[in-house]
Image (cartoon, grey):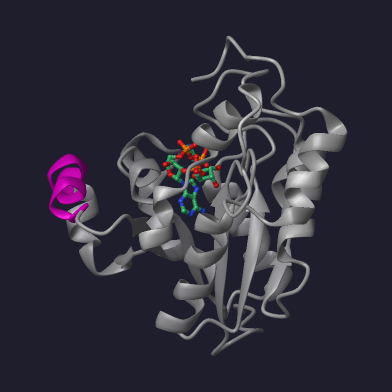
């Protein structure tokens, strides 16, 4: 018999590399929770992002700690180590199955990520199962328009069109790539991410050196 524990609960799953986490991510999670009436948003830092070469991202321990620091003050936010603790590439289909096992198969999961990341979704592992496991909230900058997403996704995703929910987030003009560049160049990152994360970056020396293998 199917385990329907968690029936009626709507949980957000905020998937990302978070290298580093910034206000764009936090505003996105808060907006998604409000817009789609999510009881909680669980941030899931990818252990080994499947589409990036090993060594191209910072150590998962650093990214996890920065995510904890950034989300600490919000009672609706939590952080999961599910991807960090699972060896091998962090395929989203495995993440969602594990979260269903933890929270009960009755929960409704809303996977929140950048619309640019979602453009590749047909190349993700087992896309058909992904659409059965969750709704997708595709966060975009204003003016991005989901028509681009629809064009790229083709018939598989169009069959699941009602499972893809657009969310416009002005703060997404902030980007992790820009923050890493600023740190490398010794420029200010103030007001782009929480102070605690900025202090962590400074103390640990993250992003001081240029990474060559980045995707
Ligand atoms: P990415 O390619 O680094 O990011 C693409 C764009 O989306 C960037 O502009 C990024 O901005 C933005 N973005 C990423 N996560 C976001 C979030 N949660 N909210 C708002 N914007 C976000 O993507 P990624 O972060 O490595 O991966 C995103 C998620 O997709 C992860 O959970 C990853 O595991 C999953 N994924 C799964 C597969 C698979 O199952 N095969 C393949 C690829 C990705 P920032 O750089 O500022 O974050």
Whether 125 is among the magenta residues is: no
Whether 152 is among the magenta residues is: yes
Residue 215 point in image, percent of width and height: 49, 20
Q: Residue furthest bottom?
A: 8
Residue positioned 73% across, 80% down in the render: 75
On the question of residue 211 being in view, the answer is yes
Q: Image quadrant of residue 84?
A: top right
Residue numbers of the magenta segment:
144-155
On the question of residue 81 being in view, the answer is no
Residue 148 point in image, percent of width and height: 16, 46
Residue 86 point in image, percent of width and height: 75, 41
Residue 32 point in image, percent of width and height: 45, 73
State whether residue 165 is above or below residue 57: below
Q: Nearer the viewer, residue 118 or 139?
A: 139
Q: Nearer the viewer, residue 45 or 191?
A: 191
Residue positioned 57% across, 80% down in the render: 106
Residue positioned 68% across, 18% down in the render: 55
Q: Image quadrant of residue 72?
A: bottom right
Q: Nearer the viewer, residue 119 or 215?
A: 215
Q: Nearer the viewer, residue 129 or 191?
A: 191
Q: Residue furthest top?
A: 212
């Amino acid at each position: 018999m199917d385990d329907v524990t968690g029936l009626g609960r709507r949980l957000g799953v905020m998937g990302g590399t978070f290298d580093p986490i910034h206000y764009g991510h936090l505003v996105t999670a808060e907006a998604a929770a409000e817009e789609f009436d999510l009881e909680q948003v669980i941030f899931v830092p990818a252990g080994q992002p499947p589409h990036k070469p090993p060594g191209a991202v910072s150590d998962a321990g650093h990214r996890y700690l920065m995510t904890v620091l950034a989300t600490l003050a919000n009672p609706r936010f939590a952080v999961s180590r599910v991807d960090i603790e699972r060896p091998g590439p962090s395929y989203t289909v495995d993440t969602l199955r594990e979260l269903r096992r933890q929270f009960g198969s009755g929960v409704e999961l809303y996977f929140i990520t950048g619309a640019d990341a979602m453009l590749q979704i047909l190349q993700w592992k087992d896309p058909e199962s992904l659409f059965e496991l969750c709704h997708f909230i595709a966060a975009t900058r204003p003016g991005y328009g989901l028509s681009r997403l629809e064009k790229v996704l083709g018939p598989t995703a169009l069959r699941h069109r009602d499972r893809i929910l657009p969310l416009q987030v002005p703060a997404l003009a902030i980007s992790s790539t820009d923050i890493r560049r600023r740190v490398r160049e010794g420029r200010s990152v103030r007001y782009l991410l929480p102070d605690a994360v900025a202090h962590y970056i400074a103390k640990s020396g993250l992003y001081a050196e240029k990474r060559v293998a980045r995707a």
